Structure formats: structure tokens, C-alpha cells
Amino acid sequence: MAGRLKVLTLLRTLSASSCQCPAHSSGMLVGHPHSTTSKEDKEYAFEMACSNIRYGPGVTAELGMDVESLGAKNVLVMTDKNIANLPPMTKVVDSLTSRKINFSVFDDVRVEPTNESFEAAISFARAGNYDAFVAVGGGSVMDTCKAANLYAADRDAEFLDYVNAPIGKGKPVTVKLAPLIAVPTTAGTGSETTGVAIFDHIPLSAKTGIAHRALRPLLGLVDPLHTLSMPRTVATYSGFDVLCHALESYTALPYTERQPRPPHPQLRPAYQGSNPISDVWARDALKTISKYFIRSVEDPEDVEARSHMHLASAVAGIGFGNAGVHLCHGLSYAIAGNVKTYKPELYNSSHPLIPHGLSVVITAPAVFQFTAPACPARHKEAAVLLGGKADVKDEDAGLALADVLRTYMQALGIEDGLTALGFGSSDVPRLVEGTLPQHRVTKLAPRQQTHEQLGDILHNSMTVY
Ligand SMILES: NC(=O)c1ccc[n+]([C@@H]2O[C@H](COP(=O)([O-])OP(=O)(O)OC[C@H]3O[C@@H](n4cnc5c(N)ncnc54)[C@H](O)[C@@H]3O)[C@@H](O)[C@H]2O)c1
Ligand SMILES: *[C@@H]1O[C@H](CO)[C@@H](O)[C@H](O)[C@H]1NC(C)=O
Ligand SMILES: *[C@@H]1O[C@H](CO)[C@@H](O)[C@H](O)[C@H]1NC(C)=O
Ligand SMILES: *[C@@H]1O[C@H](CO)[C@@H](O)[C@H](O)[C@H]1NC(C)=O
Ligand SMILES: [Fe+2]
């Protein structure tokens, strides 16, 4: 009892010191685990699932030994066509070869994967009898590999069985997956820490995903040397993804406000809302970003800055993997899914695509101006962590954070709004339509939204500066 009281006091202190806004201080830790749950019951618990991360320059050399320890006899290594010819892949192949490990390579991952490209990877994985998976690349590769692992473990499953409801059936994963080791090469999605695999569902012109703890990699080998080959645009866009993961998880609806409380612990979602432990990771990532993000883009040989950003992507990933993300991501799934002709510089892409981090950050100034009234203290605190000024009134919190964001966006050459990505006002209804099914994340915003308000955020994002 004394122990429990200590924990309660500690958590109260943590929550009180981090934020005084009503949304974050009310209802903290109330609720009764033994009462039967009804629709109105709010959540009272959160769970922190921690990933295995090993970080260090050159740590990829250890991969072969890890695979050997797993006793794997037939490994599938996944990557994309760019990375296949770059040092991260060479290091992986060398390490596996040095331990005489039998492996096959699938290098046909599509950058910004679709249901179609996921299915191609799944067919490949189902055709072999693989007992371990290694993903070498950014989020596109890691997510594709997670899906291939899942559907190879459940050979009879239809593609939509595990896809998030309401688009798919949202079936919980009960089959046993093979171990997956993720070697991230961007800084980055943090996908090495999450049980989420995102793809563009072509029939819907919007992204959706498969989300279950069972998809989480067994180990993330975070080797900062891999990020040295990222072209400027990849470093920029993937860095803004880290920034938005941290900001969205930090400003997400507090977990105690999520309704309904699940009737069984296994039904508690991975994305639970902001909570005192995720907050620690989010704040740490914001501090690192403020110190190293711009440096890491401007000088590709700045090993110190690129290394810190690589670590920050895993740090933010552990935070948002438990707290969730909200509106920037919810809107991005429609923006990316409705791409017209935009092709980013230096991506060498044969198809039009809006890189994930770009589709996420483009609405960020408008999103945080919308959400700030629900939780001004957190927005102000985030702005300060990113280098904004401290003496801001509550009613100016959103503007303060938006201004800081615009400073980063302008410094790093982010396009001037949705217009520059090929959208106009007439696209807003389609983009709202594509955002509505994303309630897994949009519900986690600290302020709920009407269709009109989602439309306003998009209109306000047509230009950014
Ligand atoms: N699972 C999750 O939790 C999660 C979170 C955020 C985003 N995502 C998804 O991840 C995808 C985006 O991933 P990403 O931002 O890591 O980029 P990416 O994997 O799409 O890669 C972007 C481009 O950079 C290249 N590249 C990657 N690493 C490189 C390196 N070290 N050197 C040179 N080129 C390199 C790739 O070949 C590709 O052309 C999106 O599909 C997004 O929806 C998933
Ligand atoms: C090596 O991999 C191949 C192709 O996946 C497979 O057919 C073969 O049985 C494996 N060999 C051993 C010794 O495991
Ligand atoms: C995936 O995409 C294709 C279009 O390329 C579509 O025809 C198909 O129905 C989709 N698959 C599923 C399972 O929805
Ligand atoms: C595109 O090709 C150039 C030249 O081959 C290469 O330097 C760059 O890394 C490639 N871009 C990506 C995203 O891989
Ligand atoms: Fe993201």
C-alpha cells in the first residue's frame, strides 16, 4: 500500500509539474479497476511497452551474431532499390556472411508503400520458409517487412483481415510472428520501436495501417553511420517526422480522457494518449531537435548532429508508440494518398509521392493553432523546448508554437503549403473525406474536430509563410 501511494504521489507530481491545463490535470488516476466498464467509463491506466534498442556507430556489425543467437536458418532481408547499393546494406550483408547465415534479399520495397506493394512483399515472404526477418531502410522498408512477417505467419489471412477498422477488419494478432530485426537508415519514423505498419490504400486514396504490438521488431539496431548517406531532402523530411511525433504525442489527449476504457487489458490500444512516461521521451526528443536538426541537414558530414537525430527518432518513437500521434498524421494520410504530380527532389522516384514527413509537417502550424486552446501550457512548453520565447500568454500559445515551426520549416526549405504540393481549395472536401476514417489517431487530438474545422485547418495550410 505504501508503495502504491508513493507511485501515485510520484505520478501526480510528474503530471502536475508538466502541465497545469485542465485537460491534463483532471481525472488523473481516478477510476476503479474492479468496476464493470460501460461506454462512459474513462481510462484509468496506461501501459508502457518498451522496445529493445541497441544504439552505436557501427553496431550493424553485430547483426550476424544476433541472428545466429536466434538460431535462424533462413533469413529474409528486405530493403529498397536505393539502399540496396548503399553502405547500410553492404554492412548487413557482410555481417550475415561473416557468420555464414543463409539469407535471401527482397529489394523491391516501394518508397511510400501501397496495399499493392505490401502484397508483393507478402507473396515473396510466403513463398519462402523464413524464420527471421531483417529490415534495412526507412519506414517504408520497416513497415513492409512487418506486414510480410505477419502474413507469412498467417498464410490463410486475407489482406484486409488485419488492417485497421473501419477500412479493414482490425483482427487482433494471435499468430506467432518470426523475429524481426530493424536497421533504420533515416532519422526517422521510429518504426523500429512501433507495432505499426502504414501503407497507402489505393482504393481509398488514403493511408491506413496495421497496428498491433505483435508487429513490433524484436530489436532495433540503431547505427547512426547509416544516416550519413541521406540526401538533404530525406534528412529534412524524415527529421520533421521526428519533430511531429514528439509534438503530437506531447499534446495528445491525456490517456485518462480516452473513452471507453477497454474491458480487457489486451484491448487497450497501443496509442493510449499522452502519459507521464511518454512525455519524458517527447521532451527529450524536442531538446535534441532544437540542438541538432538544422545542423544535421546543413552539413551531411556532421556525424555528431546526424547521430543525435538518429537517436532522437528512436526516442520520439518510444514516446509516440505508446501515446500516439494525432491531427498532423491523420491529415497527412489523406494528403499523401491524394498526391497528384509532386515528386520530391533527390528521391529518384519513378512515381509521384509526397514524402511522409513533408505531408505531416505541412499542416503542423495550422494544427497546433487549432489544438492549443485545449492545452495551452503544453503548446507553450513545446515551443520553448524548440527555442521559442518563454513569456507568452495562454491565448497566444498556438501562434507561438506555429511561429517556431515556421522558423524551422523556412530554414530547411519546406515548400510553401499545400498549394506548392499541387492542391487547391477544391481538393479540401476530398482531403477531409480521407481524414475521417483516421479516427484511430484524430480522436487522440486534445480538441475534437468537426468536418468544417478539419476543412479550416486544410484551408489555413494552403500557404504556410
Ligand atoms: N510505422 C511507423 O510507426 C511509422 C511512423 C512514421 C512513418 N511511417 C511510414 O514510413 C514511411 C516513410 O519512411 P521514411 O521517412 O523513413 O523514408 P523512406 O523509407 O520512405 O525513405 C525515403 C527515401 O530515402 C531513401 N533512403 C533511406 N535511407 C537512406 C540513406 N541512409 N541514404 C540514402 N537514402 C536513403 C529511400 O531509398 C527513399 O528513397 C511512410 O510510408 C510513413 O507512412 C511509419
Ligand atoms: C537457404 O535458403 C534457401 C532459399 O531460401 C533455401 O531453399 C535453403 O533450404 C536454405 N539452406 C539451408 C541450409 O538452410
Ligand atoms: C489494392 O490495390 C489495387 C490497385 O492497385 C486494388 O485494385 C486492390 O483491390 C487493392 N487490394 C485490396 C485488398 O483492397
Ligand atoms: C538518388 O540518386 C543519387 C545519385 O545516384 C544518390 O546520391 C541519392 O542518394 C539517391 N536518392 C535517394 C533518396 O536514395
Ligand atoms: Fe510519422
Image (tube, helix red, strand yellow):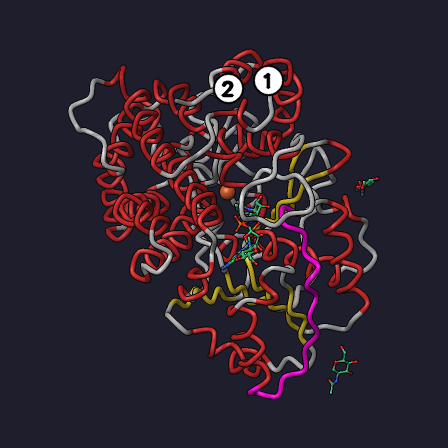
Q: Upstream in the sequence, badge 2 or badge 1? A: 1
Assess whether residue 365 is covered by the magenta stretch: no
Residue 427 coordinates in the image, percent (x, y): 64, 18
* Front residue of 44 and 104: 104
**Residue under numbered circle 1:** 424
Q: Most extreme residue toward the left, as rendered?
A: 391
Mark 2 vs mark 1, CA separation in Å: 7 Å
**Residue under numbered circle 2:** 462
User: Where in the image, quadrant-wise, is ligand 4 located?
Assistant: bottom right
Residue 156 appears in the picture as rendered: yes
Q: Are marks 2 and 1 in contact (CB under 8 Å)?
A: yes
Q: Amino acid at mark 2?
A: Met
Q: What element does badge 2 sit on?
A: loop
Residue 287 coordinates in the image, percent (x, y): 26, 45
| Magenta region, residue range | 98-112
The circle drawn on residue 97 is none
